Image: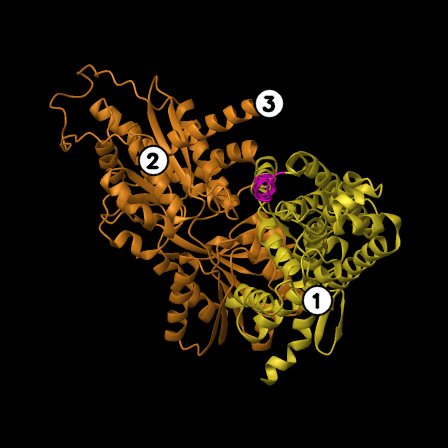
């Protein structure tokens, strides 16, 4: 038990980093669901594409082993390129796969989402081949950089991931709560028709929501690339599943809920591995999901929505 | 209007899918058993009866999903073998065609693919499947169809013990690999405690169990075992556990080299000081060495095939491969060997009988004797289908390549 307790700080750090990534992915699911009541299952793939865009920028700016720009600038450019690229990708997906089906029964856009997901996965498989691509994070941030607190090693990469993720979430929170655009988004989420009647350009709000959600997914892709360094065409599947689980845990459609769900999931996963067994990692995570849904069917921060007639 | 076009396209696609999925299965024509001496007069004297083909060979491996990188390398090497055979006009006037079957790393899918290949009577042999679980799943189907299949990477020991007549492989068995690794860890690395991490696949669990058994025999008492899944990319939680145990050796008999590289990186990040030893899945210069950015320096990997870069017979093949497809790991070259052996057998069957049947191809594959290919040893199949002379090689990561440190031959 003593040995187990001693690894607690390290497992918390591990869980926190993992959780911040899950949270970023969960936000994309939750925002889109909040506005359209649509489960955007292509979101995992958007995240994967983000990782590949970041990798492409890295390969461009680091030919061989020399950095053409300072490391911090490279990381910033990777993040920005991935966020922009994924944001536009999200908009295109919405326009192509969801808008024509907006008035269709709810199952239709769901199937369409799965189709987009398969399409993106296989498009990357065909163009990039099935090989794993490695983020050579070591060139940007030496692996041995880091600090030790309470026997836990926190590498600089982990700090960076957590800081960037939290920063993005704060910006999002500000955007949704304090700006006109955010107000429009919240109004659309509450009642699309009424919002339209009040003069809100609902289509534009939906487009912006897809853009932001997908951009966050893209950022998560780059951060995971920097942290776990191996990316491949299939990575969106598991990550998407975990992000979706986090969104559901926190209360799908609810933005702070998605963040909470993400962090919770990451920490439970790490602690579960440390104290129960690595073999049952996913089992533990999904048991917690079932438990939460049994106790609070709308998720931790979810509120009861009245069925519209 | 547009709607009707879409409906039409969808219907068309469905039809195409349905017909390809359930192609009529012609029962293989029962040909009489080939006699050892088919012609009485010397073959050069008799005019050959016309055989117009087509001649097809199959490649079965994983081409989509998380393990696709390994499988595509196998597929590309197999294609190279077929292309070279055709360029040298192996069978004059007839192009050998390669049929690809994606197993998706899933025994259920592999069986479907195998059924389809067995049903196509113009397929005369197969290179593959890629994994022990898929070799096991498809054995019965190939046996019934008398279809020879030569696996380039199934190392499961049981596979050649079931009495199947159509199974061959150019790689050694896990009952050599796991003990060889265990002996290496204890005798060469002086391990007193070992942490074994498997990835829950048949391959990985088999190796982990065999190694654990041998380690116990050798007197290692502190052995821990844990599992990861092939979809994982973060191992920091598990490695935090490993660190608490501070083992001498971390043994990773897992299939994906990218995961091995990530384990090495996170071991360094967390300060786990132990020798890292991997099995054949880790033998990939691009994933395990370049992808690890130095974290795997000094790690050991056992491999069922040598690094063909250092084998003179392989030079033209790997140069041609790199020119066309780029870098490669450990799984490709044995696939080339499998396919080349199969094509040789087809050629001999044709030269001898003037026609090609599954039975005479099977006979000729079985008759392969002392064939020196690109793996650096002479392939002869024993009655079980195992290649005698196949060996395990233990390599160490030095700089940007693997350096041979030990060779363990099959008995």
- Mark 1 belongs to which subunit? A
Query: In the rendered structure, which segment of residues is drawn in magenta?
Result: A104-116
> Mark 2 or mark 3: which comes first in sequence?
3
- State the image coordinates of residue B291 (x, y, percent, origin top left): 62, 51
Neighbourhood count class around disc 3 (C-alpha, 10 Å): few under 14, some 14–19, many 20 upward: few
Same chain shared by disc 2 and disc 1: no
What kind of secondary structure does the magenta stretch mostly adopt?
Answer: helix
Could you give the CA–CA distance between mark 2 and mark 3, rounded to whole angstroms?
36 Å
Of residue A188 and residue A15, the one placed in the foreground of this image is A188
| Residue of label 3 | B2
Neighbourhood count class around disc 1 (C-alpha, 10 Å): few under 14, some 14–19, many 20 upward: many
Q: Colour of chain A?
A: yellow
SS at mark 3 in the image: helix
| Residue of label 2 | B116
Q: Nearer the viewer, mark 1 or mark 3?
A: 3
Tell me whether circle 1 and circle 3 mark residues in contact (CB < 8 Å).
no
Neighbourhood count class around disc 2 (C-alpha, 10 Å): few under 14, some 14–19, many 20 upward: some
SS at mark 2 in the image: helix
Q: Nearer the viewer, mark 2 or mark 3?
A: 3
């Amino acid at each position: 038990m003593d040995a187990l307790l001693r690894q607690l700080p390290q497992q918390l750090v591990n869980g926190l980093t993992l959780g911040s990534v899950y949270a970023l992915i969960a936000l994309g699911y939750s925002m889109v669901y909040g506005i359209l009541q649509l489960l955007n299952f292509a979101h995992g793939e958007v995240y994967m594409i983000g990782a590949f865009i970041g990798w492409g920028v890295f390969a461009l700016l680091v030919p061989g082993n020399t950095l053409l720009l300072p490391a911090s600038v490279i990381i910033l450019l990777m993040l920005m390129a991935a966020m922009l690229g994924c944001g536009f990708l999200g908009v295109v997906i919405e326009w192509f796969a969801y808008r024509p089906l907006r008035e269709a029964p709810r199952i239709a856009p769901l199937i369409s989402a799965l189709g987009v997901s398969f399409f993106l996965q296989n498009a990357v498989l065909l163009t990039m081949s099935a090989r794993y691509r490695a983020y050579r994070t070591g060139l940007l941030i030496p692996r041995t950089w880091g600090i030790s607190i309470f026997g836990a090693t926190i590498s600089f990469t982990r700090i960076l991931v957590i800081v960037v993720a939290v920063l993005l979430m704060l910006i999002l929170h500000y955007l949704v709560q304090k700006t006109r655009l955010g107000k429009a988004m919240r109004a659309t989420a509450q009642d699309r028709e009424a919002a339209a009647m009040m003069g809100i350009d609902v289509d534009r709000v939906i487009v912006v929501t897809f853009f932001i959600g997908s951009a966050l997914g893209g950022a998560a892709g780059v951060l995971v690339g920097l942290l776990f360094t191996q990316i491949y065409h299939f990575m969106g599947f598991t990550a998407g599943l975990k992000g979706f689980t986090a969104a559901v845990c926190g209360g799908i459609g609810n933005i702070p809920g998605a963040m909470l769900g993400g962090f919770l999931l990451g920490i439970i996963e790490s602690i579960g591995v440390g104290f129960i067994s690595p073999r049952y990692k996913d089992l533990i995570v999904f048991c917690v999901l079932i438990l939460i849904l049994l106790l609070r069917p709308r998720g931790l921060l979810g509120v009861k929505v009245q069925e519209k007639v | 209007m547009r709607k009707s076009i879409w409906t039409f396209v969808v219907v068309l696609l469905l039809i195409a899918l349905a017909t390809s999925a359930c192609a009529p299965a012609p029962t293989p024509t029962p040909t009489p058993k080939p006699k050892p001496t088919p012609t009485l007069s010397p073959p050069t004297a008799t005019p050959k009866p016309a055989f117009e083909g087509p001649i097809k060979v199959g490649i079965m491996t994983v081409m989509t999903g998380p393990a696709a990188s390994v499988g595509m390398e196998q597929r590309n090497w197999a294609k190279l073998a077929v292309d070279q055979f055709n360029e040298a006009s192996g069978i004059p006037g007839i192009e050998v065609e390669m049929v690809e079957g994606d197993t998706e790393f899933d025994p259920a899918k592999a069986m479907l693919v195998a059924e389809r290949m067995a049903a196509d009577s113009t397929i005369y042999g197969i290179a593959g499947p890629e994994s022990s679980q898929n070799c096991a799943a498809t054995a019965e189907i190939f046996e019934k169809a008398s279809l020879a299949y030569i696996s380039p990477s199934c190392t499961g020991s049981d596979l050649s013990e079931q009495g199947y007549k159509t199974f061959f492989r150019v790689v050694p068995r896990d009952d050599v690999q796991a003990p060889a690794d265990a002996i290496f860890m204890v005798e060469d690395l002086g391990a007193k405690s070992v942490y074994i991490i498997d990835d829950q696949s048949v391959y990985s669990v088999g190796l982990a169990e065999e190694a654990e058994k041998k380690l116990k025999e050798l007197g290692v008492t502190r052995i821990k075992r844990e599992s990861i899944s092939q979809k994982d990319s973060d191992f920091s939680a598990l490695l935090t556990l490993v660190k608490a145990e501070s083992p001498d050796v971390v043994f990773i008999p897992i299939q994906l080299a990218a995961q091995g590289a990530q384990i090495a990186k996170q071991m360094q990040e967390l300060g786990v000081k132990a020798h890292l030893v991997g099995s054949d899945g880790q033998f990939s210069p691009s994933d395990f060495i370049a992808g690890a950015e130095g974290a795997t320096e000094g790690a050991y990997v056992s491999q069922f095939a040598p690094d063909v870069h250092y084998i003179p017979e392989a030079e033209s093949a790997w140069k041609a491969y790199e020119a066309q497809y780029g870098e490669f790991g450990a799984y490709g070259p044995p696939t080339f060997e499998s396919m080349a052996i199969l094509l040789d057998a087809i050629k001999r069957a044709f030269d001898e009988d003037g026609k090609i049947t599954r039975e005479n191809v099977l006979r000729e594959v079985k008759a392969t004797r002392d064939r020196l290919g690109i793996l650096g040893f002479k392939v002869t199949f024993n009655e079980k289908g195992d290649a005698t002379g196949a060996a395990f090689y233990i390599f160490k990561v030095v700089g940007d390549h693997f350096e041979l440190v030990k060779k363990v031959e099959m008995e």
